[in-house]
Image: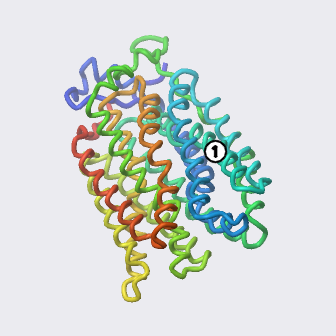
């Protein structure tokens, strides 16, 4: 049985007495933390490659596809929307399967699907075929990244350090966003967008799949004073039906809808927007990379703060900063304030846009517990993501209709700031000391 000194407690906000039976029971939920941080590092590498080369790099391919295939901005946006839709639909299934059969098969299969999708896209010659291939890839990303990775890390890492652990894990995506847009732009200009997609597929199949087969496994959880192991049904938390009846859970879904709609609209279109106002493709990709540097710093900063302070006000503050950054981007084309506006956007939005993925799952776990965490996280993100998946299409439509990004940027900023309201109704999430 794992030594209890290596395990951390997870008392609720009303049960914080270290010596209580409840605290001793919950101390056995978390395994040896050295192994836990190895899992965190592995998930960071996975997100670096899978998120960095897909979600963070769509902007590299959209101008190339519109030029090569003669598609409209809305049609090119449909490619990203198809990816986002299937990714979102795959999330609850991935969470449900992870709660029942574990993450290894789910995540490694997802990474393989992602690689297959990009291989198919690289040999496609019309918009519809590429859209279908990206839909396959999106399903793979949904099964191999966000939902299962967060659920996995939160099962390994003790409650006091979960915010930092999620920050480290998500920083992998930020590092990927620094590397891949520039790298893929270079490959595209030197060879072609098809070669760039084949490169992405090779990384997924040759690096991510073996890594997930090695590290993506749940910890064994011993019962108190026993060599037997905890069944999933005995983990603390609500049933799915109980959680679905809680208004607070649906408010959590609402904040996911607003923040995801806003973030995806910006994420997919910031490079095309900068190109449209005079930036070269390489300059736009470099600016995007600096945004990712800010994201890396923000993930670590808010992760450290979350181990000391209540998560809810941290998320509210970060969301307000991100909304301000989007509004600043609207001035990027101004002759007097353009450069300053881009710098403000890069720092403010870049440091905070990913906090919805880093901090909001902790608020949800405070409400529903660990028992069906993966499933409920997947259901919530499915509902939120179905609407948010059409964000790239909506931005493309607004661009084709008005000839300007201003309306789309204003809508994204309003959604980000509006998310502060449902965040205010979430429970407190105050870190506790580990139980020795």
Q: Position of residue 217 (x, y in %)?
A: 58, 30
Q: Which residue is mark 1?
A: 135
Q: Residue at x 36, y 25 (%)?
A: 27
Q: Residues within 10 Å of mark 1 (few under 14, many from 20)?
A: many
For the view shown, which residue lies furthest in the left direction? 14
Q: Position of residue 164 (x, y in %)?
A: 40, 47
Tag 1 secondary structure: helix
Q: Residue at x 34, y 55 (%)?
A: 415
The residue closer to the viewer here, 364 or 58, is 58
Q: Does residue 104 appear to the left or right of 69 in the view shown?
A: left
Q: Does residue 337 appear to the left or right of 287 in the view shown?
A: left
Q: Is residue 368 above or below residue 67?
A: above
Q: Position of residue 64 (x, y in %)?
A: 68, 67
The residue closer to the viewer here, 45 or 332, is 332
Q: Is residue 91 above or below residue 412?
A: above
Q: Position of residue 125 (x, y in %)?
A: 78, 57
Q: Is residue 179 above or below residue 127?
A: below
- If the image is split into quadrants, where does the C terminus sit? top left
Q: Does residue 24 appear to the left or right of 201 in the view shown?
A: left
For the view shown, which residue lies furthest in the bottom direction? 336
Look at the image and tell me whether residue 377 can be seen.
yes
Q: Residue at x 57, y 52 (%)?
A: 51
Look at the image and tell me whether residue 296 can be seen.
no
Q: How many marks?
A: 1
Q: How is the image coloured?
A: rainbow
Q: Residue at x 45, y 16 (%)?
A: 230
Q: Is residue 343 above or below residue 160?
A: below
């Amino acid at each position: 049985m794992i030594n209890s000194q290596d395990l951390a407690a997870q008392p609720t906000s009303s049960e914080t007495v270290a010596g209580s039976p409840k605290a001793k029971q919950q101390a056995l939920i978390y395994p040896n933390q050295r192994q836990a941080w190895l899992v965190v590092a592995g998930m960071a590498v996975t997100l670096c490659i899978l998120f960095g080369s897909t979600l963070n790099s769509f902007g590299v391919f959209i101008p190339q596809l519109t030029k090569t295939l003669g598609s409209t901005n809305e049609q090119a946006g449909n490619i990203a929307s198809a990816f986002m839709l299937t990714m979102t639909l795959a999330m609850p299934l991935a969470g449900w399967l992870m709660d029942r059969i574990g993450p290894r098969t789910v995540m490694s299969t997802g990474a393989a699907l992602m690689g297959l999708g990009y291989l198919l896209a690289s040999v496609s010659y019309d918009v519809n075929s590429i859209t279908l291939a990206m839909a396959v890839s999106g399903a793979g990303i949904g099964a191999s990244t966000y939902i299962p990775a967060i659920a996995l890390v939160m099962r390994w890492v003790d409650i006091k350090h979960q915010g930092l652990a999620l920050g480290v894990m998500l920083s992998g995506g930020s590092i990927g966003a620094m590397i891949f847009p520039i790298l893929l732009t270079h490959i595209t200009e030197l060879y072609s967008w098809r070669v760039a997609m084949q490169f992405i597929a090779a990384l997924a199949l040759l690096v991510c799949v073996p890594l997930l087969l090695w590290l993506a496994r749940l910890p064994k959880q011993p019962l108190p004073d026993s060599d037997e192991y905890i069944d999933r049904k005995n983990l603390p938390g609500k049933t799915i039906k109980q959680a679905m009846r809680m208004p607070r859970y649906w408010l959590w879904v609402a904040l996911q809808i607003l923040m995801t709609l806003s973030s995806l609209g910006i994420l997919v279109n910031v490079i095309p927007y900068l190109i449209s106002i005079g930036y070269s493709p390489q300059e736009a990709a470099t600016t995007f990379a600096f945004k990712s540097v800010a994201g890396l710093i923000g993930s670590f900063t808010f992760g450290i703060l979350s181990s000391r302070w209540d998560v809810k006000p941290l998320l509210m503050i970060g969301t307000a900063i991100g909304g301000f950054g989007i509004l600043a981007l609207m001035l990027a084309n101004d002759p007097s304030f353009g450069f300053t506006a881009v710098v403000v956007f890069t720092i403010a939005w870049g440091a905070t846009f990913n906090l919805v993925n880093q901090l909001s799952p902790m608020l949800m776990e405070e409400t529903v517990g660990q028992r069906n965490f993966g499933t409920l996280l997947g259901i919530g993100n499915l509902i939120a993501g179905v609407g948010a998946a059409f964000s790239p299409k909506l931005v493309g439509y607004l661009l084709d209709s008005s000839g300007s990004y201003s309306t789309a940027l204003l809508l994204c900023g309003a959604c980000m700031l509006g998310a502060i309201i449902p965040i205010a109704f979430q429970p407190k999430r105050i870190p506790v000391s580990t139980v020795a």
